């Protein structure tokens, strides 16, 4: 018998929820907002819109499925099962927050406020999400009936960038994986940052596989691996999904470097503000990594931190002499697109 499906609805607290936590009463929250030229009515309207969207999506979950609700702050303590379908109702960043906890579970990114989000990851409006959940319910019932009769439920064709699950077409987005030589691992959807905890100068030796823009100077090439001792304000390694964010601003400043697409098994990396000195170079500052390539940083500071998708609280700490290796992640985010 197939495992019973479960819908995991992920959301974050609204601004109104946080205001009431901080100020205790609606009156005090209203006074606080008014002192800053805002109104409680506008905050309440957004709260109602998001709450109604989440309720409508939840009501569309097939009745034979189980259901769990998870707030963003609790994701690290929640176990996502292999048979789960994840429904994210919120901003693009919330999908990125969820991605690191997943293996191959399909994810529906639902935008409760179309027009206020970029829509890179929350690509579904509420009516579309409702229709897809209903379709997934029909696919579940068909699979159960096929199992009981010894048949096989139909499925769509898969390729390297798309796949099908429960009658839903997914786009499989590349992730980035950073690991320390002591076995610690961190996975992110958009980008990984390696640098000093206070964003001051980070000292390390960098070694990169694959094509880049280093030329002469202090960079040393051994075979296809180039390396250089550097002092900089950190290193960014981004996927195609992250190529519209932090990485995009750096690429634009450097003349519009080519960046990978969301499903490309490749990463773009940039060194921020490399400092040339008698002991450090500034030639090996950007490049691309393919699916087999690695970027390695050997720490030459007291400590460097590694975090993903802008979440500094969830980070790895590498001390002097440790090696940080960044490569394309083994798992891909299966984002439902239709």
Image (tube, rainbow, N blue to C red):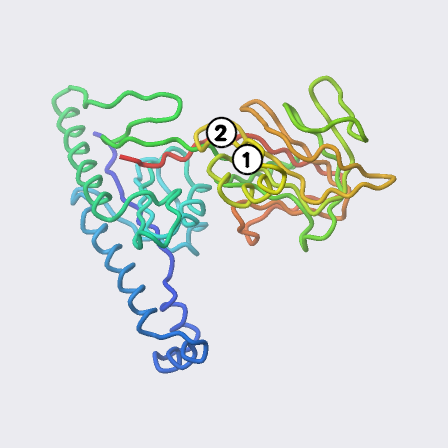
Question: Residue at point 73% right, 40% down?
Answer: 299
Left or right of 191? Residue 105 is left
Label 1: few (<14), some (14–19) or many (≥20) C-alpha neighbours in 10 Å:
many
Would you name the residue on which mark 2 appears? 330
As helix, strand or loop, the secondary structure at mark 1 comes to strand
Left or right of 206? Residue 328 is left
Question: Residue at point 77% right, 42% down?
Answer: 300
Would you name the residue on which mark 1 appears? 177
Q: Nearer the viewer, residue 125 or 316?
A: 125
In this view, 15 is above or below 187: below
In this view, 332 is above or below 121: above
Q: Nearer the viewer, residue 129 or 250?
A: 250
Left or right of 174? Residue 209 is right
Please provide percent x and percent y for residue 100: 46, 41
Circles 1 and 2 in contact, beta carbons < 8 Å: yes
Residue 117: mark in rendering: none
Question: Residue at point 61% right, 41% down?
Answer: 236
Where residue 207 sits, quadrant-wise, is top right
Please provide percent x and percent y for residue 307: 58, 46
Where residue 318 sits, quadrant-wise, is top right
Question: Residue at point 39% right, 66% down?
Answer: 15
């Amino acid at each position: 018998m197939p495992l019973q499906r479960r819908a995991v609805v992920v959301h974050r607290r609204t601004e109104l929820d946080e205001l009431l936590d901080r100020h205790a009463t609606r009156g005090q929250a209203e006074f606080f907002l008014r002192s800053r030229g805002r109104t409680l009515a506008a905050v309440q309207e957004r709260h109602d819109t998001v709450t109604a969207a989440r309720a409508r999506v939840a009501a569309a979950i097939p009745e034979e499925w189980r259901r769990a609700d998870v707030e963003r702050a609790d994701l690290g303590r929640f176990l996502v099962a292999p048979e789960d379908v994840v429904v994210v109702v919120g901003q693009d960043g919330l999908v990125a927050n969820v991605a690191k906890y997943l293996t191959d579970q399909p994810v529906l990114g639902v935008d409760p406020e179309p027009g206020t989000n970029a829509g890179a990851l929350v690509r579904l409006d509420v009516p579309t999400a409702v229709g897809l959940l209903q379709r997934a319910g029909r696919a579940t019932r068909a699979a159960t009936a096929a199992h009981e009769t010894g048949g096989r439920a139909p499925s769509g064709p898969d390729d390297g960038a798309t796949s099908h699950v429960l009658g839903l077409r997914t786009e499989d987005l590349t992730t980035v994986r950073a690991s320390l030589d002591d076995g610690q691992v961190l996975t992110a959807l958009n980008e990984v940052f390696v640098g000093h905890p206070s964003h001051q100068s980070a000292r390390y030796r960098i070694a990169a596989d694959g094509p880049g823009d280093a030329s002469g100077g202090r960079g040393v090439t051994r075979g296809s691996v180039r390396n250089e001792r550097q002092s900089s304000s950190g290193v960014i390694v981004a996927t195609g999904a992250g190529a519209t964010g932090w990485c995009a601003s750096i690429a634009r400043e450097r003349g519009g470097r080519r960046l990978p697409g969301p499903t490309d098994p490749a990463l773009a990396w940039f060194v921020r503000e490399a400092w040339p000195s008698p002991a450090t170079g500034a030639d090996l500052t950007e490049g691309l990594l393919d699916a087999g390539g690695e970027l390695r940083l050997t720490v030459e500071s007291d400590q460097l931190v590694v975090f993903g998708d802008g979440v500094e609280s969830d980070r790895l700490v590498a001390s002097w002499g440790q090696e940080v290796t960044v490569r394309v992640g083994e798992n891909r985010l299966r984002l439902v697109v239709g």
